[in-house]
Amino acid sequence: MVKSKQATGISCYHCGDKIQQTHLVFDEKDFCCNGCQQVYELLSANNLCDYYSLEDTPGIQRRNPVSGVKYNFLDDEQIQNQLIQFRDEKISRITFHIPTMHCSSCIWLLESLFKLEKGIKSSRVDFLKKQVLITFAHQEVSLKGVVELLSSLGYEPALNLNDIEGRKKSATNNRLLYRLGVAGFSFGNIMLISFPEYFGLDAFSRSDFSRLFGYLNFILAIPTFVYSSSDYFISAYRSLRKKIINIDFPLALGILVMFLRSSYEIFSHSGIGYFDTLAGLVFFLLLGKWVQQRTVDTISFERDYKSYFPVAVSVLLPEGETTVPVSQLKVGDRILIRNNEIIPADSILLAGEAKIDFSFVTGESLPIQKVLGEQIYAGGRQTGGNIELEVAKHVSQSYLTQLWNSEQFGKEGKSNLESFQTMVSKYFTFFLLAVAISSAVFWLIVNPAHSLNAFTAVLIIACPCALALSSPFALGNAMRLLGRARLYLKGPEVVERMAHVNHVVFDKTGTLTSSSEAVIEWHGRELKEEEQFQIGALCNQSVHPLSRKIAGYLPHSSKQLSVSDFHELTGRGLSGRVQGKEVKAGSASYLEVPSQQEQNLLASRVYISLENELAGYFEIKHAYRESLKSVLTSLSEGRKLSLLSGDKDTERAIMQDFFPSGSALHFNQTPADKMLYIDRLHANGAVSAMIGDGLNDAGALKVSTVGISVSENTAHFSPASDAIMDASVFGKSGNFFRFAKHTLLTIHMSFVISFLYNLVGLSFAVQGTLSPLVAAILMPISSITVIVFTTGMTTYFAFKDRLFQPEN
């Protein structure tokens, strides 16, 4: 029952605001307005009142009810196409930015939307970005209905269509800068205020100025402790809940002890505390995070859509076909998508038979047939012949990044390498606690007055700041340098995995050979011009290097020839109907041609049949990369090498001249065979790197410890690859792996530096006589030394390993 009465200074049960005027009472609870009461009624009716048990008064004030016409514009199909990221016959997906999201109750309620509206199938919250990804059945609830539900709960989404994405990214980046700025402000001012104590100025240290400065330091340290360092406490708490100890645990413990002991000294007038050390430590830790984030943003290639979607896409212009970077696609561009290529932007189907596999988006692998004029969403993979599309929406970096981070892109079966930093930090933590407790027990027996000093001083001086800083700075700078050298990594952890590789596996065609330099010849009966057009049209449907070579070799018809019933059997061949005639191109086994005994050892054959009659074959003479011999020699130092080729073993003798003695050379390998070979290597304890072109070896790239896709100049990359290498720097492959080992060596060396600093500090701390001056000097110097050392050494090794010098 609802009652109305005069306000008496109480708070609204839903939003917590003070009730200033007449307020409402419902279910023995007070509300400031109809909006708050209606939200409560809605939650109560659906048994969702746990919302109020997670946080006190978590709701958002709703004095102005949702207007019945406010969101009518969302019924406009054109507006929906701008907002919705994916839609098929059953479901739609959209990401909303929710500015009012602020606590755990918000997360709980937003992820329980399906209980309030049956048409909502799922909702997933990204609290740091204040985003919610909602999947809903548009036949059961409209986009307008979803937005009205969110607004009625107090979570009105931001629907500004102009550069919402850019603002959200900027806000996310600014969060770390705010924390860094607060810590830097506190650090600088605390150091400035502490100078009189450092230099022993009696006029200050022996007067009330000393106490005043102590109180000021305490006030300046509170924002650093509560705000800037909060992520370390959250991380440490989460690790303890999982019954593990990560590197943030000793950091959080050291910061906590430092703050508590310093506060005790200030208010008991027994010392000046360690607030300068605390602020400096947090500042340099956050600075390390910021540098790594800047590195990632600078080389956005490996973090955003470019690491998964084609670096370049084929664009159709009046003068012919060309390629442009996917980031430069514009609305209205006409693009050509071949078999197994990814659609990089929401587009309209203009020509061709589209069979789209949306498994990367929805998890459903059954291809969906699209008709001319229908919209096709980004993330789909074409599974038939060529299709022509018109770009309808700009490439969405955030959406493609969501796809990249989804479970469908998870890399299973990876090598169980334990991060060196995590391993060392775990033992460091136990060692640190053991030393601190031992010191406390020793002084408790010898001189109890020194016991607490010794315990806290050990935690303060031995806090592993260098351990936390070395990996972000070294790996982040290494990632930046490798990007400059045109090896683009998915993330900094790939550098560490590269350093541990002890077995490198190569694909042959398109990896060891250069398709741009290959020579092609026709052997067979004379082909009519019309037949050449038909063969070229079929081969133009594929992204395989041999198909692309044949398509470029044959003349093109003045009118575009459509291909129907197109099929491609990976690693074997193509088939389709062109102008009503059946055309096949592929290996001898694919066309059931008797094996040829006198085949050129330096060439591959692609057989052609027209209307089930063998017409002849194209012989593509391989042009091996000039630097191949030196690359294989370099990579064989401390590593085993293998070759997995889908071709026949007629080139075995040639390959044996290139590969070092003892290398395993395997031919006639199917994509499944390549995956099984990598699995067998891992079962025998190997740490593998697979280097291929991402076509027939996509599965092997996925299961390998490090998968590197080699790119000529466009088009097709495997979503499973950890890195993309520009083919022009293939000759530096050995340099890249050597640089990864040197980067790991740099991290190890920085740990030694940290150990020496800690050794000096502990020699004072265990005595129970460590002064704040010594701690304040040692900790910042240690951090600065690690920063300068790691960035300097990785840059030095980049030049020493000839990452930027042209190949000989």
Image (tube, helix red, strand yellow):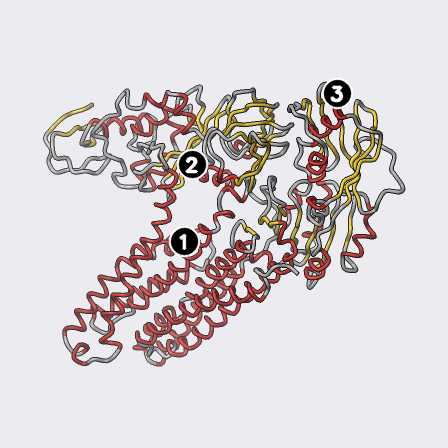
Q: Residues within 10 Å of mark 3 (few under 14, many from 20)?
A: some
Horizontal arrangement in the rendering, residue 283 relative to residue 472 (left or right):
left
Which of the two discs, 3 and 2, labels the residue nearer the N terminus? 2
- Circle 2 residue: 124
Horizontal arrangement in the rendering, residue 643 relative to residue 157 (left or right):
right
| Place of residue 478 in the rendered image (x, y in percent of width and height, measured from the top left) | 52, 59
Report which quarter residue 597 is drawn in: top right
Horizontal arrangement in the rendering, residue 25 relative to residue 233 (left or right):
left
Looking at the image, is mark 2 or mark 1 nearer the viewer?
A: 2
Q: What is the distance, in whole Å, between disc 1 and disc 3 at their CAs?
A: 64 Å
| Place of residue 101 in the rendered image (x, y in percent of width and height, measured from the top left) | 32, 39
Q: Which mark is residue 235?
A: 1
Q: Which mark is residue 594?
A: none
Looking at the image, is mark 3 or mark 2 nearer the viewer?
A: 3
The answer to whether residue 42 is above or below residue 688 is: above
- Circle 3 residue: 581
The answer to whether residue 263 is above or below residue 488 is: below
Which amino acid type is marked by label 1? Answer: Ser
Q: Residues within 10 Å of mark 1 (few under 14, many from 20)?
A: some
Which amino acid type is marked by label 2? Answer: Arg
Badge 3 marks a residue whose secondary structure is: strand
> At 76% across and 25% down in the image, what residue appears?
531
Q: Nearer the viewer, residue 465 or 36?
A: 465
Which of the two discs, 2 and 1, labels the residue nearer the N terminus? 2
Q: Residues within 10 Å of mark 2 (few under 14, many from 20)?
A: some
> At 27% across and 20% down in the image, what residue appears?
68
Q: What is the distance, in whole Å, between disc 3 and disc 2 at their CAs?
A: 50 Å
Which amino acid type is marked by label 3? Answer: Lys
Q: Nearer the viewer, residue 1 or 473?
A: 473
| Place of residue 361 in the rendered image (x, y in percent of width and height, measured from the top left) | 52, 33
Looking at the image, is mark 1 or mark 3 nearer the viewer?
A: 3
Badge 1 marks a residue whose secondary structure is: helix
